[in-house]
Amino acid sequence: MPSFVTHYLFAKEFDSSDVTLLGSQGPDPFFYYGIVKFYRPNIKKIHAFGTFLHKTRLSKTISYMFKYLEYEDEHGKLILLDYIKGFLMHYSLDRLVHPFVYYRTGFPKEGEKKKLKYFNYHTQMETYLDVINASDFNYKVDYKKIINISEFELRVISRMYHFVAKMFNEYDDSIDVDTYYFAIKDMILEIKLLNSNDKCRRKKVFHFLFRNTPIDTMSHMRYEDVPKLDFLNNNHDEFYVSYLENKKSNDDFYTLFNKAKEYYISISNNLNKLDVNYIDSLSSNIDFDGFKIGEEKIHYSLIFK
């Protein structure tokens, strides 16, 4: 990620349709699939597909999305082009912000068994960023309307993901024409459950029942309950943006946010021409984590003690 509110606010910086706002969630909805409705089939494979899309070459995913446009009518094509714009917004923000988040929340190293704690740190920091950003943007989150598209539009997008999975030839047995559709339905339900109006009471319940689990860390709290830690990097501490090249940055969060806006404008420039080579040259083989594909993350400095 960053989490869903931050991506939503990023997309709102542009003239985004409701479909583009959904696209700005990128592959993340696959991670919501079956968390509450645990009877759904192929949950682990579908979560793995979400991870796969985050770590594979952007231009390859986009090229398959473009390829699928050939199978839709003009109305369907317009829906999908709007969606792809949002998908590129998600990539743009992830690419710039994720190295900072990973550096401050850590990651499991080879042979390390306690992997869940790093995932919890990651989701917790991104939840804090959601709450901070909503406050800084003076945005009152309406969790019931943050995803607001028609059944028809959602079905079109879900069919596209089925095609993309078939093209990758790794997940075509588990990603069917309804998988993304149900992932979004689950995401809407889980967002409502995790973010009820009575934040103080609800957060205490989740913290008591699900302490140190993703359910607890994904549940939004009141702004005043966010720990007084430097989640925005206002102190301009250095973090790694490339381990291969030993490159560091000390940008604060909103500098990264604005750089992501500039990057999105550049990468979406030739979108209507379906110029995959242009996207490939600008993505520079960097995945959604913000590092070269296959690059090993080495150093971190935990913000949580």
Image: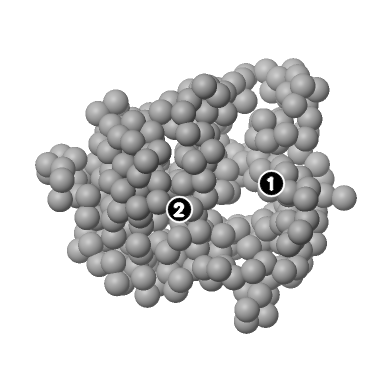
Residue designated by label 1: 119
Residue 208 sits in which quadrant? top right
Report x, y in % for residue 109.
74, 61
x 72%, y 44%: residue = 116
x 66%, y 43%: residue = 123
Q: Is residue 269 visible?
A: yes
Report x, y in % for residue 44.
54, 38
Residue 53: mark in rendering: 2
249, above or below 256, in the image: below
Amino acid marked by disc 1: Phe
Q: Nearer the viewer, residue 165 or 137?
A: 165
Amino acid marked by disc 2: Leu
x 33%, y 36%: residue = 176
Q: In what element is the residue under mark 1? A: helix
Badge 1 crowding class, 10 Å Cα cut-off, few under 14, some 14 to 19, many 20 or more, is some
- Rendering colour mode: one colour
Left or right for 232, reference 159: right
